[in-house]
Amino acid sequence: MNYVFIILTFLIAVGIANLIIPRILLISLRKKLYDIPNERKVHTRAIPRLGGVSFYPAALVAYCLVFAIRLLTGSEITSVYASHLLIEMLLYVCGMMMLYLIGIADDLVGVRYRQKFLVQIFCACLFPLSNLWINDLSGLFGLYEIPAYIGMPLTVFVVVFITNAINLIDGIDGLASGLSSMSLAILTLLFMWKGMYSYSMLSVAMLGVLIPFFYYNVFGSAERARKIFMGDTGSLTLGYTLCFLAVKYSQSNPGVTPYTQHAFFIAFSTLVIPAFDVVRVVLVRFRNHKPLFEPDKNHVHHKLLAIGLTPRKAMITLLALALLFSAVNILLVNYVNCTLLLVVDVVVWIGLHLWWDYLKQKRAMAG
């Protein structure tokens, strides 16, 4: 029955999002709520950017409705497990609501980055408050169990970092939603394998929301007013959910959840592309003495566009790379040291960028 509930959650989330997104499009068009193109952006027409408004409500309704059905049909949830789940979900909903509201404000009227940053830090602090924090690095850098005074600040940093990474990678159609969908699909399967079906349901609920959005975002026609962006509302709530699930999967909690070897490395392998990209961008800005949080055209998708790929091909290339990184890391982590795997990932990432820089320079000389 747990598999039935997971499938039902997915279908309800897809259905709700499919109902909401066309109405958001209609409201955006009537009220002229557009993302206006500029020299930094890829699109050339004014596109509605409130698609992310559908993410949180649709996922929450699907999850809560099916979870209630699950309880009413007599599914057993141990009291120990339920006590952890309840506080985690309550504070997760609080954090999501705050990010949802700040995201809507930013998409409608604009919010200063410092204010968004402070809200993100506060929402990240709700993780340790619910006793959800990174307490085991599973052998990464030779570290295993870590104390709370290290793990809790590390968790806050990781949540803010990943949330912003998803926000910053949202530069071409389908990229942020595609990368997030891939991560959510993998996390859904990982939680199912551990028997943590409540978290699989949450993961698959957000995945279900992204399916209709991906269609409108990638295949929708701007000329026919059928195209939409997720905006900050979508990227912030999406990043926060991914962090919640990744941190939960990586947490070692004997007696409550099954232990998984190399859980930390496995969970965050699904987010390699956005994480590596934001690190590279910040380092480049620092080297060039530019503001660290000022938008530019130095992200990986901009580089792929500069070497001649279309936005669609750039998106597919990065999704394929993300799948390759995740698959290799997850399949090999039981046979190869995870620190060595991380080093190989970094070397491959640097090598790819050097190759793309060469192609970009060659293309510029030819032009």
Image (cartoon, rainbow, N blue to C red):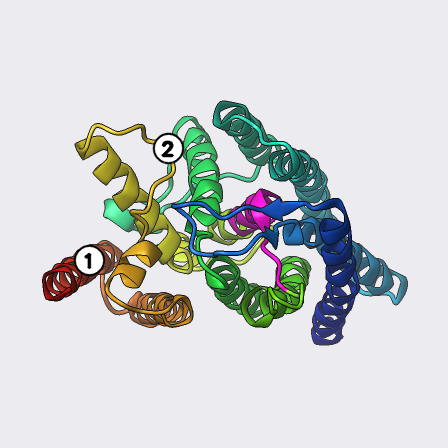
**Residue 363 at what x, y percent from top left?**
15, 65
* Residue at the spot of label 2: 294
**Residue 145 at what x, y percent from top left?**
37, 41
Decide if residue 115 is in sight here.
yes
Dividing the image into 4 quarters, which one contains the C terminus? bottom left
| Residue toward you, 59 or 169 | 169
Magenta span contains residue 184: no
The three-letter code of the residue at mark 2 reads Glu
| Residue toward you, 313 or 41 | 41
Rendered residue at 74%/72% (across/down)? 11
**Residue 154 at what x, y percent from top left?**
40, 34
| Residue toward you, 303 or 154 | 303
In this picture, residue 278 sits left or right of residue 123: left
* Residue at the spot of label 1: 353
Task: Tell me which segment is drawn in magenta.
Answer: 227-244
**Most common SS among magenta residues:** helix
Rendered residue at 23%/65% (across/down)? 336
